[in-house]
Image (spheres, rainbow, N blue to C red):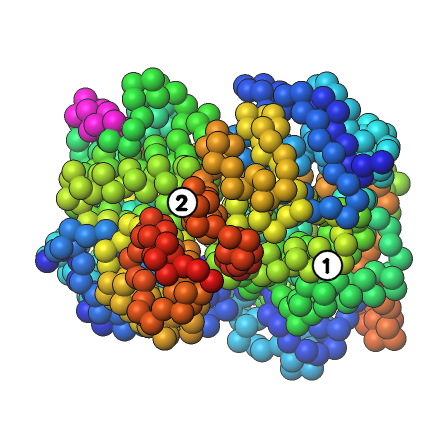
Amino acid sequence: MPFIELKNVSFKYPSKQAIEQLSLSIEKGEWVAVVGPNGSGKSTLAKLIIGLLTPQSGEIFVEGEKLTPESVNEVRQKIGIIFQNPDNQFVGVTVRDDIAFGLENLQVPYQEMLTRIDTYAAQMKMTEFLDKEPSNLSGGQKQRVAIAGALAMQPEVMIFDEATSMLDPKGRLETLQAMRELRAQKTTLLTITHDLKEALQADRVVVLNEGQVLATGTPREILTNIDILTEAKLALIEPLELLNKMEEAGISSQEWEAKLWQFALTL
Amino acid sequence: MAIRLDAVSHRYTSMDGSFFQAITDIHLELGQQKEMIALVGETGSGKSTLVQHFNALLTPSSGTVEVMGIKINQETVKAKSFKKTPIRQHVGLVFQFPEYQLFEETVLKDVSFGPKNLGLKENEAILKAKEALFQVGLNETYFERSPFQLSGGEKKRVSIAGILAMEPDILILDEPTSGLDPAGQKALMDLFLSIHQKTKTTMVFITHDMNVVYRYAKRILVMHQSKLVYDGTPQELYQMPELRTWNLDLPDSLKLQTFIAQTLQLKESLLESSVDDLITLIKEEGRL
Amino acid sequence: MKNIVIGRYIPGNSFLYRLDPRVKLIALVLLFAATFIISDIWVMVGALGFVIALLPIGKISLKRVFQGLKPLLFLLIFTFVFQILFNTQGRLLIAIPLQFNIVNTLLAFALFGSWLFLKRKIKFTFLSFLLVLGLIVYGFSELTMFVPYNTSTLAVYETGLTMALFILLRLIIIVTLSTVLTISTKPTDLNLGLERVLKPLKLVRVNTEEIAMIIGIALRYIPTLLDEANKIMLAQASRGVDFQEGKFKDKVVQIISLLVPMFIISFQRSDELANAMEARCFVPGKPRTRLNQLTWKPIDSLVLGISIMSVITSITLRILGS
């Protein structure tokens, strides 16, 4: 049974269609990257999965349970989500208050709350900042607080909705590193991005265009496929462009391919 | 002389009376060469504070800024005759988020706001606005639309047109491509390049993206911990050992070139090689 | 902005800082009540002495508190002068005959006008104001060689003076105590204390927790929104808006050019924030556990006890006095 499953989901904003007849499933332990240009429906997809929006037609299942107004709160406990703007998801006055926010909502007992705050602040390397206010933190640090706050609720899947797009290079690397660590702990990840270097890290890439799945496959299948990328207004990243051209010129080898791929992951 | 900064420092006073030194002793000249200039540096290094001195949004705590012959310092701004609007006409500053400035009912009205503030009559201002909108690639079909119903990229273009309509000699752009997808980023940067080539406007853009710097900048300014630590060509910057301490990355193209050079165990650097150059090189050298 | 001390927390460490915010709020209300019950001027002086003695014990600088009083100085003087002039009960203390003529009237205007002009440039604004006031009174009483158009008497009566002093002292005590509260209590703690103190209102269906949540989020976002407002101003200034100049019609457009972006950005922000809160399982009205716990310490009982005692004492003294 897939962990998250969308069946023929459609969603329309008053002014435009955002998601059309979309079906998608995510297995437990998998890292899926959803890529696509702005306006392709990526963020709408995330909001549908976590029940912030309700599809006009189609069904969404999380661990086999159908997402309905009644089940939405139970489903949300299984999913942590990090949004794009680090400032607009910081609820607490201090880091400690913010990590506690979700726990307070889940009615976690006081002592347990203290332990969890310590554990997840340490995991995100934010222990020394626990009493700091958001205005004293960088964008990357705020995103790490958001991740700690989500993790403290012990979800089974984490969604990153363009979580790196408003950060500077340092903040971006910090957040990517956090994703890799979660990956190492076998957390199911769904990352939504237009940064193909981020998508490269995933197990599976889903290309979204105009509210529909244009293609899905391994990063190797998708991110070197110029036809798919062009249709979704995305561009090849340079090492893969080189790899493609080497193949055309007939000078590629398995060794080169492995090396360039390894290199691409460091970008 | 376009903009000249002479020993400019700025410090902010916070609510509890403590000081924060945002920029320290900056000497800088720009605008004579009509270049595309990139301004880079980590968050909090003083980039935004620096550019807000270029159009007199901030007055230096010490030192003097000179814009088109007008001196701006603690003494001169006190004079009754000191007017900031002409400076802001010469030097246009586009903020990072278009939401900071869009407020009118229609795109055309919004873009004509700037020219009207400069004292132009309604019809002249509208004319300037139309020109500016065409310049940023928005045609008549956009004129009567509400700026709030446009996509992120379109809003950005309207906000840029709002400044271009004031016909500045120097255009400053604070993180112009943030929040756009790769196609949107490229389209916008290409647009700046073409405006620059047509109108010979000096452009300064703040960015975090070294790939953008690599492709578009002829000159680069680096801010680090409130100081201007580098002012020169990007090519020289890429060779500098201090790059790491300034927390700057190399552009992907250069990283790839370095990687290929290392893999092929070449001695010479491959600076400025395109992917096609690399292919040729690998063909010659490339049996691993 | 910098001079507004009321409502600003200043980090520190003393028993006042460690007090339970609930106790601080209740004590404040009780002590306010006491100042309204006290009817003897000497008891009031004693109360002020008590409040002032509290400052060094609580490690709160007198200067900070004085800064808090400063914006209210003219209100204090006004009520004081008003009471002195219009209360005509009791023994007559001083009577200065005044004559109003063209010369001393003009002189009074000139003096007051030059004080208004100079007050930004000189130190000791308050002292110089008193000096100017004295000179004006002197002018009206002594420069009587010209033809008067009116005469009057500046009369100060005993009850008037006592009442004026009384109100002055009461206002000083109230402002000082409020300043002490806000200086020594974090806004979040204050909010939490308020939530708990107002809990009985739940009986009349006021959702105190939600109100506290709203205040808490407002506190969190005030710095962000101030920053945003500043950036909007700079962005519009870059489009040639000169906020210092312009005709009335221009001013209206200028203000709209600030308000519309502010409104739209705040709206976007609150929409995203609401999403983030909901995604973290926040359901309005649903019970929550709380990280910030209030713990009742012996000192809290002591302070509460002292506050109750001061109310009882002031009642007793009032009954004995009358």
State the count of labels. Answer: 2
Write the residue at 24% across / 31% down. Answer: B135
Majority secondary structure of the magenta segment? helix
Res B231 seen here: yes
Q: Which residues are magenta?
A: B123-134
Picture layout, residue A124 above or below residue B19:
above
Write the residue at 52% across / 46% down. Answer: A195
Q: Chain of mark 2?
A: A
Q: Is residue B132 magenta?
A: yes
Judging depth in this view, the residue of B156 and C9 nearest the camera is B156
Looking at the rendered structure, the kind of residue marked 2 is Ala
Looking at the rendered structure, the kind of residue marked 1 is Ala
Q: Which residue is mark 1?
A: A184
* Helix, strand or loop status at disc 1: helix
Picture layout, residue B122 above or below residue C275:
above
Judging depth in this view, the residue of A252 and A188 nearest the camera is A252
Q: Residues within 10 Å of mark 1 (few under 14, many from 20)?
A: few
Query: How far apart in space, not on screen, are marks 1 and 2 (Cα)?
Result: 37 Å
* Helix, strand or loop status at disc 2: loop
Residue C224 lies, in percent from the top left, at: 53, 52
Q: Which residue is mark 2?
A: A249
- Find residue C55 and report its image quarter: bottom right
